[in-house]
Amino acid sequence: MAKPVLTLDEIRSHVERCCKCPLCEGRTHVVFGDGSAVARVMIVGEAPGKNEDLQGKPFVGAAGKYLDELLAIAGLAREDVFIANVLKCRPPGNRNPQVDEINACADFLREQTRAIMPEYIVTLGNFSTKFILKTERGITSLRGQLHQTGKFKVFPVFHPAAALYDSSKKVVLEDDFAMLGELLKKPREQ
Ligand code: URA
C-alpha cells in the first residue's frame, strides 16, 4: 500500500521528537524548515549552523542574507519558497554531515518534498545535491543545469556560504539564480 502523504505539521511533530542520531543531544532547536506549504520552488541546504540552531529557522545568518539576495534575482521572496536542510539538527562546530546522520534524517526531507510537491528543487552545494540526485558527482560539474529526478526538476547551485568565502563563485551563483528566474517565467507544468 502507498505510504500516506503527511502534512508539514505532522512531519514537524515527528522531527521535533526525533533522537535517531546523536545530534539531538546537542541541539537548542530543531530546524524544520520554513516557507510556503505549496511552494513551486523548494530550496535544500546542508545543515543548520549556530544561528539557525539558536533561532530554529533555516538560513538566518550571513549565508541566509545572501540567499535572500539570490532569491530576489530569481524574482522570489522567502515566503514564495520552502527552505529546508538535509539535516534538521546542527552538527557540532558546523562540521560536515556524516553518512549515518544523513541516513537518519533522510525520511524527513523526503516527506517534506512529498507534502509540498514543488516543481523545482534547488539544491545548495554538494551535500544536498548528492542526496537529492543520488549521485557522487560534485557540484561544480552539476550546477546550473536542470536534472530530472522522479517528478521533480532539480537545479543544483553552489552553496551561498561557499560564495561568501570564494567571491569568484558569486558571479556563477548569481547567474544561476537569474537562470532560475527565466525558468520560472514558463507556466508550471502539471
Ligand atoms: N547553511 C545551511 O546549509 N543551512 C542553513 O540553514 C544555514 C546555513
Image: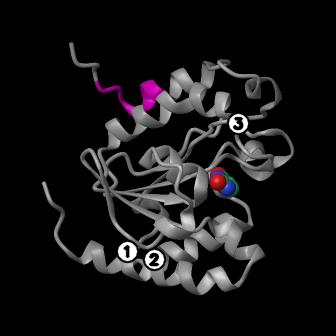
- Rate crowding at label 1 as few (under 14), some (14 to 19) or many (20 or more) other CA atoms within 10 Å: many
Q: Are marks 1 and 2 in contact (CB under 8 Å)?
A: yes
Whole-percent x and y of residue 2? 23, 19
Which amino acid type corresponds to the residue marked 2 in the rendered image? Phe
In this view, the residue in front, 26 or 151, is 151
Please indicate whether residue 149 sits to the left or right of residue 106 in the image.
Answer: left
Residue 104, position as x, y percentages in the image: 59, 25
Q: Which residues are magenta?
A: 5-11
User: Looking at the image, is mark 3 or mark 1 earlier in the sequence?
Assistant: 3
Between circles 3 and 1, the one closer to the viewer is 3
* Relative to 166, residue 131 above or below: above
What residue does disc 2 label? Answer: 177
The residue that appears at 52% across and 23% down in the rendered structure is 13
Is label 1 in a helix, a strand or a loop?
A: helix
Disc 2 crowd, CA 10 A, few/some/many (<14, 14-19, 20+): many
Task: Return the residue at label 3.
Answer: 98
Picture residue at 56% right of the left edge, 69% below the top:
140
At horizontal 37% and vertical 74% (from top left) the residue drawn is 180
On-image quarter of the C terminus: bottom left
Q: Which residue is mark 1?
A: 180
Can residue 160 be found in the magenta stretch? no
Q: Nearer the viewer, residue 50 or 176?
A: 176
The answer to which of 36 and 94 lies nearer the viewer is 94
Question: Helix, strand or loop at disc 2?
Answer: helix
Of the two numbered discs 3 and 2 in the rendering, the one whose residue sits closer to the viewer: 3
Q: For mark 3, give the secondary structure.
A: loop
Foreground residue, 3 or 56? 3
